[in-house]
Amino acid sequence: MSRERAYLAVDIGGTKMLCGIVSMSGEVLTQDRTPTPQHDVWDALAALVSRVQASRDVDFVACGVGCGGPMSDQGDKVSNLHITSWQDFPLRSSLAALTGLATYVDNDAKAIVLGETWCGAAVGCRDVVGMVVSTGVGGGIISDGRLLDGHTGNSGHIGHVCVAPGGRRCKCGAYGCLEAQASGTAIAEMTGRPAAEASPAVIEQTGIYVGRAVASVAVLLDLRLAVIGGSVALGFGAPFYTAVQAEVDRQASIKFSRGVQVRPAGLGADAPLVGAAAVARRHVE
């Protein structure tokens, strides 16, 4: 009897790193996680990936990776803004050497939008922005059924759209970026409390900022749907999504953009790993 075929999936964030085995139909078969350390990030990641890869006897098709950027095309060099020790880190080649698998790397939010159009809340939608609102804020865009990569592979960085002119300085160097106003890191810095303890007013304001960015991108690219995941967005729940939708309705008012929908990521907590698998799927299927 032949072994089950599956993807090795890796998600690298500023707070935690995930690794899992994902079936060819998008089901997470097994997973594990570890906090993202301040130092020796690669050592922690390598131990996690090795442990998961050895945990189940399957035929691995490829390794897919979602990681915060920016990065060079194909993830050959990654400079995650929330992992300060990684500047031009050779992520793809390092993981390929570790796992022995063909390895494909992309921005974590681009990964999530691929996953959501594969088997999540955006199945059948050809024009959608996917977002991660977590430690940072990332985005990925499907236009006319195609994932947008851009000149260097960094298309979709909605976290660096200005939503508050003259606002807080962002790690990218600009002021008033969505990530500087609405990420979990920003909320903790502004309120002195973790995002999980945010007040209703903070949740609403965060939704307004996110809605402002979604509306701008929707008008620019004629999109019909925004799918939003990440620990902050999902943790805030319905009041956050209501505020996002209300701001999108206010700001996306030109005729062709009216009616843009906002939905939570349909894959929920599995979105990062299914998205990472979708990065590999994009290249091998």
Image (spheres, helix red, strand yellow):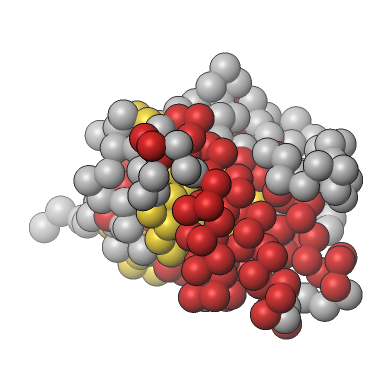
Using the rendered view, name the quadrant where residue 184 is placed.
bottom right
Picture coordinates of residue 110 (x, y %)?
A: 49, 41
Residue drawn 72% across and 81% down?
199
Q: Would you say residue 3 is visible in this rendering?
A: yes
Which residue is more in the foreground, 214 or 37?
214
Residue 204 in the image: above or below residue 175: below
Q: Is residue 174 left or right of residue 124?
A: right
Q: Would you say residue 115 is visible in this rendering?
A: no
Q: Is residue 244 left or right of residue 34?
A: left
Quadrant of the rendering where the C terminus is positioned? top left
Using the rendered view, name the quadrant where residue 75 is placed.
top right
Picture coordinates of residue 70 (x, y %)?
A: 68, 34
Q: Is residue 51 left or right of residue 226?
A: right
Residue 190 in the image: above or below residue 85: below
Residue 29 in the image: above or below residue 222: below
Q: Residue furthest left?
A: 1
Picture coordinates of residue 278 (x, y %)?
A: 37, 45
Which residue is more in the foreground, 59 or 173?
173
Residue drawn 31% across and 51% down?
122
Residue drawn 31% across and 29% down?
144
Residue drawn 11% across and 58% down?
1
Using the rendered view, name the quadrant where residue 94 is placed.
top right
Which residue is more in the foreground, 99 or 150?
150
